[in-house]
Image (tube, rainbow, N blue to C red):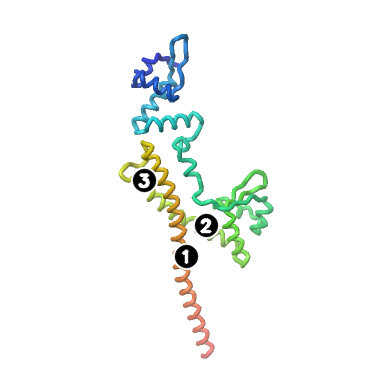
Amino acid sequence: MTEYRIEDLARAAGTTVRNVRGYQDRGLIPRPIRRGRVAIYTDQHLARLRVIADLLGRGFTMAHINDFISGLQRGDDLVEVLGLKDLLAEPIQRTPTQRMTAAQLREQLGTDDPDVVQRLIDFGLVNKLDGDEYLATDTDTLDAYRSLMAIGIPLTYILGLQRRLEDDLQVAARTLITAGRAAITEGRFDGWIPESDEEEDWAMTFVRQLRLTGRIAAHNTLNRALDRELGRQLDDYLAIAKARRHSERAADTA
């Protein structure tokens, strides 16, 4: 491993001795090895200085770089380092949950078919825990399932409906988030990272507001679409029923 005096390290990194000492005081590079009164730096210090120079060249502030390196030293992942993980990982809307045993889950579903349980896991409605326990992550939806099953709608039919809803609503989610991504990079570039505290605050507020607006707009838009489609199909259904009754009466009088 190559060893450097501070002047040699600064020269190899394309920076100044003053900057090296400043980064060291900030904790951005490790302290040197001491041999008597001489400070010895290594390739590790040089690599860290090159990372700092690269981040500065990409427009990061020293505050961002400090958070970035401190996070990596703790073993955080990149999203955590950028301060977005808690915001992005938090569910847009929390749903009531319930822990239950495999037997309780089977009782609620009315079946012990492992394929049914796996489909619920795929939908994100159930999570497998340790042992024979499960976590129902959306008991509201499971309660609605049971209400339909109680009036004779087969569970397999309900799960097919859920699959189609998942696919259709994924398209809606992609539309909204893609539009948000375009808005946040408008006048900038894809992959843009805030360069100041003000820009970072704006970006965080934007993401929060996008999630809130998307939830409200999607919920209310779906309700209006359900009302329109229900009315349309009800009219169609009643028209067919009326035509059939008229046909039956005509046959009876023939």
Q: Which residue is mark 1?
A: 226
Residue at mark 3: 184
- In depth, the one of 156 and 66 nearer the eye is 66
Camera-side residue of 170 and 196: 196
> What's the CA distance linking mark 3 and mark 2?
31 Å
Residue 2, position in %: x, y? 43, 15
The reply to whether residue 118 is visible in this rendering is: no
Against 183, residue 193 (above or below) is above
| Mark 2 nearby-residue class (10 Å; few <14, some 14–19, many ≥20) | some
In front: label 2 or label 1: 1
Badge 3 or badge 2: first in the primary sequence: 2
Q: Which mark is residue 191?
A: none
Confirm or deny contact between disc 3 and disc 2 (CB under 8 A): no
Look at mark 2 in the image and give the residue it sits on: 163
* Place of residue 233 in the rendered image (x, y in percent of width and height, measured from the top left): 47, 71
Q: In the displayed structure, does residue 74 sit left or right of residue 111?
A: left
Q: In this rendering, would 50 be left or right of 120?
A: left
Q: Choose the circle earlier in sequence order: 2 or 1.
A: 2
| Label 3, residues with CA under 10 Å away: few <14, some 14-19, many ≥20 | some
